[in-house]
Structures are given as C-alpha cells and as structure tokens.
Amino acid sequence: MAGNTFGHTFRLTSFGESHGKAIGGIIDGCPSNVELNFKKIQHELNRRRPGQSTITTQRDEADEVEFLSGIFEGKTLGTPIAFLIKNKDQQSGDYDSLKDVFRPSHADYTYEEKYGIRDHRGGGRSSARETAARVVAGAIAKQILAKQKIEVKAYVTQIETARMRDASAEYTIDQIESSPVRCPDELVSGIMIKRIEEIRELGDSLGGEIRCIISGVPAGLGEPVFDKLHADLAKAIMGINAVKGFEIGSGFNAIDALGSEHNDAILPDGKTKTNHAGGIVGGISNGEKIWFNAAFKPVATISQKQQTIDKHNNPVTLEAKGRHDPCVVPRAVPIVEAMAALVILDHLLRQKTNRL
C-alpha cells in the first residue's frame, strides 16, 4: 500500500501534491444506499481550508470537492467513491529558492533520502494540503456514524501557554465554532488569538493541543491484540502533520496516580463512575465517551533566518518565503475529527463480522 491507504474495511487512499493540479482520494468499503449531505461535506472542508481568517495562511483555495464515482442520485453505490479537489492558488515561485535546500524540521531531507527525488513546491506530498482528502472521507464517515447516533467533536484546549480553564466541561459545536481558534473558552480564546497575531509579526510559530470527544460509541469496538481501538486512533492522529503526541483518557497523568485512584469503578447499569480509561479498556470500547488529546508542534516554516544545508551539504542561511500558518492548531480540528471518525466507522463495520 506504500503508506497512502488508511483503514481496514472502510479505506481511504489519498493522492496529490500541494502544488500539483489536484489532490483527492478513493474511498473503498463504504456501505451502499447511504444518502449523503454534500453541503455538510463541503462545510467540513471549509473548516479546514486556508484563508478562513486573519490568523491562518492566506493561500486562497476554495477547496470545492468534486465526486467522480460511487454516488448516484445522492446515494452511495457501495462501489469506490473517487473525488477531486483542484489546486487553484498555487504560488510555486515562492519555493524556487528551496529546490536544493532542506528546510529545518520539514520532510525535505527525509523525502530526498527515501525517494532520491522530491517535489519542493510547498512540500509536495508531505504538505498538510493532503489532509483535505482525509476531511472529505471523514465527513462521509461522520454522516454514517451520525445515523448510529455517534458524534465526533474536537476543540482547541491549548496554544503555547494559554490553556482552557476547564477542558473537560461539555461544550457545544456552536461554542467551538464561534471562536476563530476553535477554543470554546471565550476568555482564553481571546488570549490565544492575540498571541498568534504577535507571533505572526515576529515571523515565528506556535504549537498547541486539541481534545477530541467521541460520544455514542457502543461497547465492543476494537480488536483485542494488534488492532486495539486506542492504538488505531493513535496511529490515525499521529499520522497528521505536526502531531507530536497522543494520549487517551488520563494519559501521562496516570503515572502519578495509584491503582485505587485510577481504576474506573463499574456501576450496576454497566457504566463507570469515572472515565480515566478514555472509553477504551483492553483495546475495546466500553460504551463510555472516548476522549483523547493530540499535541501539535510549532509550524516548521517560519520567516526568521535559520541555519541549514543544501543537497550538497553546503551550509545555507534560510529565510523562508510564502504563505504559512503561524499556528496550524485551529485548522487541524476538523482533521482530527475526520481521522477519528474514519477509525470508529472502520471498527464499527469490522464488528459487524464478529457477531451475527
């Protein structure tokens, strides 16, 4: 599969480069006769698209998805769904100076070593532009999951040192989307926006954290050994550009707890008194809400001078040009939701083969 296909039963293969003619994907294993809401699919793309606010990259892509196959009269056929998103606002000239230069903390050097050739324009295949294909597939997965009363929702909990006062509270999608940084804590959201604007002026970048909550997942999803549900979620989220950390439930905080404190007591109705496990026990969902956090590093492309080398190992002082996000975290929220939805739907369909 060469690392371009994700999923077991519900599978996405993505294609395309940042400054190529288009990006897109093929979804295989989608159930038939599912009526799709195309406006909702486009809405998910709009949440990820560049140029959506003053704190994101000003690359102006409409990100309009065009479906080529697998759908008839608004319903899925059960056959492969092919789709396309054309690239229209490439400014490849911004990258001419990078043709033989390796940008620090980018995939330039590793791609060169792996393939012996790379598309230097905007990072080529390694660009986060590719994630638009994941959002399309995730939007379809979310619609199928919604019919099973499963909801996937994510929001920004931290940017640099600005952190939500209560990240575990219940928040509505409207509260999340009302903030340009997708942080439902209005006070902290304002602090985050101000800091991003400051960093943009300095030509630097910021990282942050996203929390994802999946509600309505039935008990029993996930495989007992190698395809544990939380392991597949970790793979999905760690495969997103700039993600450097994943923790489910109490995560690293579990280190400081005693077993008597951390265990989730089971109540007579099968629910648990607490949810330190994050809704997954033994690699299998237990019917509680699944929740996890994803840590994003600061964007690698900054406009400050940096020391690096070219392909001939000559020292180079790099001052990057082009249009880049000072902080990718707000735009990554729909990507996190998409990848989580793909995992849950894939395991939901796999579970159908386990018990008749």
Image (spheres, grey):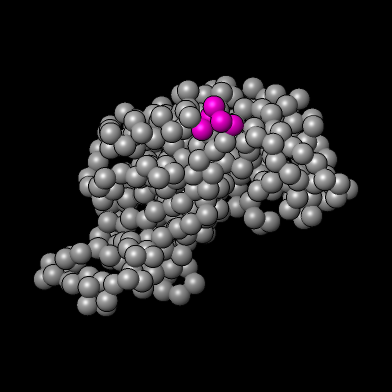
Q: Is residue 133 above or below residue 262?
A: above
Q: Is residue 212 above or below residue 8?
A: above
Residue furthest to the left: 268
User: Which residues lie in the magenta part?
Assistant: 199-203
Prevailing SS of the magenta stretch: helix
Residue 352 visible from this viewpoint = no
- Name the residue nearer the viewer: 198 or 282: 198
The residue positioned 27% from the left and 56% from the top of the image is: 289
**Quarter of image, res 187:** top left
The residue positioned 20% from the left and 64% from the top of the image is: 274
- Name the residue nearer the viewer: 188 or 174: 188
Residue 6 visible from this viewpoint = yes
The residue positioned 69% from the left and 33% from the top of the image is: 320
The residue positioned 40% from the left and 30% from the top of the image is: 193
The verdict on residue 351 being magenta is no
Q: Is residue 313 left or right of residue 138?
A: right
